[in-house]
């Protein structure tokens, strides 16, 4: 889609002004404020004795209480495991949807994927609490059948957290992958099969490699979303799980240390920005491919 | 995209396993939603399984709770304002990006989409610190504008999808037939993109209504939105009132899905 040779912006371009104003005042500027606050000892407006300092970052690096590095590591680990499981669960669903012949079937599966996505995170976390707790659906059923003596520890740990996060973010994986798999010409797979490859081999050697950009884009999206999750780890993780977003909320809510919260925010932001840039590159690559097709 | 049907053998074991796997995955997606409905109607005072009957007492408790109702109204009010604001701001932004001949369009689009990718809890934190620094407290309009910021990308996405899909020759034809640019805009472009804008507005409403991470730091005590109230309640108590509130949220999500399907077709949303 080559644009017509260097033309000037039309009057319609002015319609971007309100959005630009909103984003500069309530997005760019606040993130700048957060970064600046992370270098101040206290609120520089209300407290004239506030000084510039790197102590918040030092506190994170020195980690004398031995919790900050663990929290960062736990955040990344939960994000990573969630992403892998979401990919393993999301791929078959996305493939099924992309290859479905029936329009009605496609619409129904799509609704089944999008409806949970539009249900609030608090609500979905609540649903998992009722399923996983000691008197929840799984434990009562297993005890009723006499398969276990006492309830399994399904929540207030990392297992329950990851399980619920997978459920919450797998629709994003499915939607990203469906788009990419749908664009792969089905005849390529058929050609491989007519040349003697089994269905499984045709998938492994043709469809799977061609869907790699989608796998990458979907995984980055789910990773970015799950490392910033707050509700699910704090309700399902109990005292065993402490992630960066939980630490940030603690600093704002109970410790009231906005400077240190800002520093933690900047650290999480840097991790996210790296992911966002990579994600946008892959999307641009995908869009370019689509343009050539 | 109507490829000739491939020669499938619907009864072979591999295909059966494939279908069974996908059936199980669909069950995983939908079962938690069903469970909420079961608990919303189950009369026991604590969450217990299997259910022993059907009752509406939890809906009574929810609708009779002053805290719940206050939060529900605040959430509905916020979401309604966000709906109107994000349609105006996001719709205009989409038109400018698609028809404005702006330089650096790709970069600008990525910029306006970025609130979706950056941790929402950080957007909340950054705004909290800015309001603190500006000394304005935590006003409701601050919450509404914060939600609008998160909702604009949804309106942008659905409107751009419609704008890029429709045939520009319709606009050109109107112009050739003597319509002024303003008339082309109001009588051709605007009616054509209306479903995309409305679909985005519906998304904006639900994104605001269900919003938690952005609201967390921006609400004041006794002035919390419904998700925040539910979250605080769940930390101490897990009874049917939460299930009833959740069921209302689920019904809202389902109606949104149906409205979206009617407006633009869910397929249009799937396209990135």
Image (spheres, coloured by chain):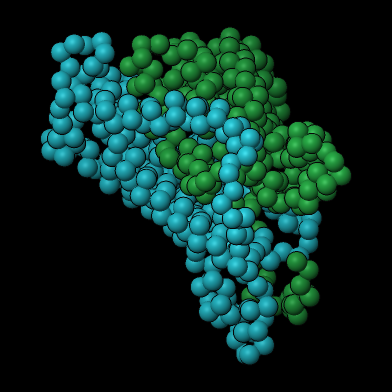
- Chain painted in cyan in the figure: A
Residue visible at 64% across and 51% down in the picture: B270
Chain B image colour: green
Quadrant for residue A124, please give it.
top right
Compared to residue A278, the image places residue B229 above or below, namely above
Q: Position of residue A109 (x, y in %)?
A: 69, 53
Compared to residue B256, the image places residue A48 above or below, namely above
The quadrant of the picture occupied by the N terminus of chain B is bottom right
Q: Position of residue A160 (x, y in %)?
A: 43, 44
Q: Residue furthest right?
A: B177
Considering depth in this image, is A40 or A128 the residue closer to the camera? A40
Considering depth in this image, is B206 or A47 the residue closer to the camera? A47
Number of labelled discs? 0
Residue visible at 23% across and 16% down in the picture: A44
Residue visible at 40% across and 11% down in the picture: B137
Q: Is residue B127 left or right of residue B159?
A: left
User: Can residue B207 be seen at all in this image of the molecule?
Assistant: no
Residue visible at 65% across and 73% down in the picture: A185
User: Can residue A129 be seen at all in this image of the molecule?
Assistant: yes
Q: Position of residue B71 (x, y in %)?
A: 56, 16
Considering depth in this image, is B173 or A152 the residue closer to the camera? B173
Considering depth in this image, is B86 or B103 the residue closer to the camera? B103
Q: Is residue B209 left or right of residue A264?
A: right
Q: Is residue B9 left or right of residue B91?
A: right
Q: Position of residue B264 (x, y in %)?
A: 74, 44
């Amino acid at each position: 889609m080559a644009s017509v040779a260097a033309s000037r912006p039309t009057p319609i371009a002015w319609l971007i002004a309100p959005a630009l104003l909103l984003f500069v005042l309530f997005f760019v500027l606040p993130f700048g404020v957060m970064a600046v606050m992370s270098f101040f000892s206290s609120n520089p407006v209300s407290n004239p004795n506030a000084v510039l300092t790197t102590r918040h970052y030092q506190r994170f690096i020195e980690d004398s209480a031995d919790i900050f590095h663990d929290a960062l590591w736990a955040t990344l680990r939960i994000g990573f495991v969630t992403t892998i499981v979401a990919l393993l669960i999301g791929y078959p669903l996305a493939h099924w949807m992309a290859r479905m012949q029936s329009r009605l079937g496609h619409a129904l599966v799509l609704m089944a994927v999008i409806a949970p996505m539009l249900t609030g995170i608090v609500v979905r976390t609540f649903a998992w609490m009722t399923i996983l707790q000691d008197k929840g659906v799984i434990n009562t059923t297993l005890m009723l059948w006499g398969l276990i003596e006492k309830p399994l520890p399904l929540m207030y740990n990392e297992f329950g957290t990851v399980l619920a996060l997978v459920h919450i973010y797998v629709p994003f994986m499915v939607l990203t992958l469906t788009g990419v798999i749908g664009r792969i010409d089905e005849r390529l797979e058929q050609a491989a099969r007519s040349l003697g490859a089994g269905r499984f081999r045709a998938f492994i050697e043709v469809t799977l490699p061609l869907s790699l950009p989608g796998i990458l884009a979907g995984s980055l999206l789910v990773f970015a979303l799950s490392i910033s999750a707050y509700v699910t780890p704090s309700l399902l993780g109990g005292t065993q799980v402490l992630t960066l977003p939980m630490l940030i909320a603690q600093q704002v809510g109970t410790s009231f240390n906005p400077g240190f919260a800002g520093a933690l925010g900047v650290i999480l932001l840097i991790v996210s920005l790296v992911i966002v840039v990579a994600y946008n590159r892959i999307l641009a690559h995908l869009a370019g491919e689509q343009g050539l097709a | 995209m109507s490829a000739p049907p491939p020669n499938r053998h619907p009864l072979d074991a591999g295909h059966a396993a494939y279908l069974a796997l996908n059936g199980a995955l669909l069950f995983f997606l939908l079962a938690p939603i069903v469970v909420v409905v079961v608990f919303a109607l189950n009369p026991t005072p604590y969450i217990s399984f299997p259910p022993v009957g059907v009752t509406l007492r939890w809906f009574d408790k929810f609708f009779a709770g002053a805290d719940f109702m206050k939060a529900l109204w605040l959430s509905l009010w916020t979401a309604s304002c966000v709906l109107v604001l994000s349609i105006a701001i996001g719709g205009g932004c989409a038109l400018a990006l698609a028809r404005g001949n702006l330089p650096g369009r790709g970069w600008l689009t990525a910029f306006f989409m970025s609130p979706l990718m950056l941790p929402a809890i950080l957007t909340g934190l950054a705004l909290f610190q800015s309001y603190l620094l500006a000394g304005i407290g935590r006003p409701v309009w601050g919450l509404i504008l914060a939600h609008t910021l998160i909702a604009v990308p949804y309106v942008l996405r659905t409107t751009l999808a419609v704008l890029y899909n429709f045939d520009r020759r319709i606009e050109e034809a109107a112009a050739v037939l003597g319509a002024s640019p303003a008339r082309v805009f109001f009588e051709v472009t605007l009616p054509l993109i209306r479903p995309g804008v409305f679909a985005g507005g519906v998304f904006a409403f639900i994104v605001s209504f269900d919003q938690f991470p952005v609201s967390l730091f921006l609400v004041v005590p006794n002035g919390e939105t419904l998700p925040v109230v539910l979250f605080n309640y769940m930390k101490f108590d897990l009874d049917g009132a939460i299930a009833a509130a959740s069921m209302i949220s689920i019904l809202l999500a389902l109606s949104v899905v149906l409205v979206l399907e009617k407006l633009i077709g869910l397929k249009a949303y799937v396209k990135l």
